[in-house]
Image (spheres, rainbow, N blue to C red):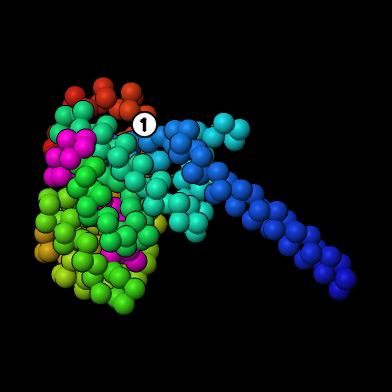
């Protein structure tokens, strides 16, 4: 029985190595894929709870892989982070999203940015160059960062944020509530939006849950600091109604819309409400 266990372990290990090798092959293909324009951007609508009209979109990258089909970001973003190619990929997504948004009526566009990108000293200048090149008003750009990305490696607030916010760009904290959620930094950093992570929204299934109390507390604190709250991954009418009651400002999720290619989004922009 013991040797059997070992054999199984070896097999599992070989399997894992093969998967790891496949992941690296995929990561190594990213630079060429960028040159061949295989990365596209889809846009998921965000609605204001007040009237449920579209007020912005989040840009989400897709890889139209010639062999593997359309890949979602969880299959290649972690790899791109490991190999550093995320910096080039992120720049491509930002440019694409700003160029698209510049041709739309005044909804905002929210773009995901990773730690590696914001820690590049040239990042604020690059963003400014992309805005100038595309003609997008900085007030229509939101950058989404995770909690771990808004501090530098010594735990000091990232100076780049002041620089970006000073130009009128808004900063959102993505997946809020999944990390350490050190609310103290909200006072020290130019944060405009908190995006409440999916698990909280999911926790609202049961009435008067602890999650409901947490959401209420987060919203109260955020509003006291002039920070708006977006609920992510809203899938049911029930969740939406509760999140509205709890004071959330905007919502995003399959209940309202899946991420859409630009050609499908454009008709929806006519009914758009806010900037
Ligand atoms: P995220 O920033 O939290 O983005 C939201 C994800 O939730 C998207 O998955 C979206 O399709 C999905 N989603 C939207 N509504 C619902 C819902 O009602 N229910 C559920 N269960 N899911 C919903 P997607 O597009 O697969 O992206 C996954 C993650 O990949 C993103 O999570 C983000 O962290 C990352 N990502 C996507 N695009 C980029 C990018 O351009 N750059 C970087 N650095 N990361 C990106
Ligand atoms: Ca995001
Ligand atoms: Ca998120």
Q: Would you call the spot at circle 1 few (<14 residues within 10 Å), some (14-19), or many (20 or more)? A: some
Using residue 99 as the reference point, say whether residue 93 is left or right of it: right
- Quarter placement of the C terminus: top left
Residue at screen point 29% across, 76% down:
155
**Front-most of residues 73 and 65:** 65
Q: On the image, numbered disc 1 is attached to which residue?
A: 260
Res. 229 visible in picture: no
Q: Residue at x 30, y 46 (%)?
A: 111
Between 40 and 33, the one lying in front of the other is 33
Q: Residue at x 11, y 56 (%)?
A: 166
User: In which quarter of the view is residue 215 placed?
Assistant: bottom left
Residue 66 point in image, percent of width and height = 57, 31
Is label 1 in a helix, a strand or a loop? Answer: loop
Residue 117: x percent and y percent?
Answer: 34, 56
176 in magenta: no
Q: Is residue 211 above or below residue 205?
A: below
Which segment did they paint magenta?
A: 132-150
């Amino acid at each position: 029985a013991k040797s059997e266990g070992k054999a199984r372990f070896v097999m599992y290990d070989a399997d894992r190595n093969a998967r790891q090798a496949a992941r690296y092959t995929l990561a190594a293909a990213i630079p060429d894929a960028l040159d061949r324009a295989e990365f596209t951007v889809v846009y998921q609508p965000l609605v204001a709870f007040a009237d449920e009209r579209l007020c912005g979109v989040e840009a989400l990258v897709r890889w139209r892989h010639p062999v593997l089909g359309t890949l979602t970001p969880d299959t290649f973003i972690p790899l791109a982070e490991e190999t550093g190619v995320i910096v080039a990929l992120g720049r491509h997504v930002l440019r694409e999203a700003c160029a698209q948004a510049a041709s739309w009526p005044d909804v905002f566009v929210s773009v995901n940015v990773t730690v590696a990108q914001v820690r590049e000293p040239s990042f604020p200048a690059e963003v400014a160059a992309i805005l100038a090149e595309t003609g997008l008003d900085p007030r229509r750009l939101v950058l989404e960062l995770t909690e771990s990305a808004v501090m530098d490696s010594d735990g000091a607030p990232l100076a780049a944020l002041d620089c970006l916010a000073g130009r009128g760009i808004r900063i959102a904290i993505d997946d809020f509530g999944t990390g350490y959620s050190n609310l103290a930094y909200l006072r020290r950093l130019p944060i405009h939006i908190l995006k409440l992570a999916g698990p909280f929204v999911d926790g609202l299934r049961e009435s008067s849950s602890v999650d409901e109390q947490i959401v209420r507390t987060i919203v109260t604190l955020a509003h006291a600091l002039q920070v708006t709250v977006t609920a992510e991954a809203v899938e049911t009418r029930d969740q939406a109604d509760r999140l509205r009651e709890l004071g959330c400002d905007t919502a995003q999720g399959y209940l309202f819309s899946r991420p859409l290619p630009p050609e499908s989004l454009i008709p929806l922009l006519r009914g758009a409400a806010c900037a």
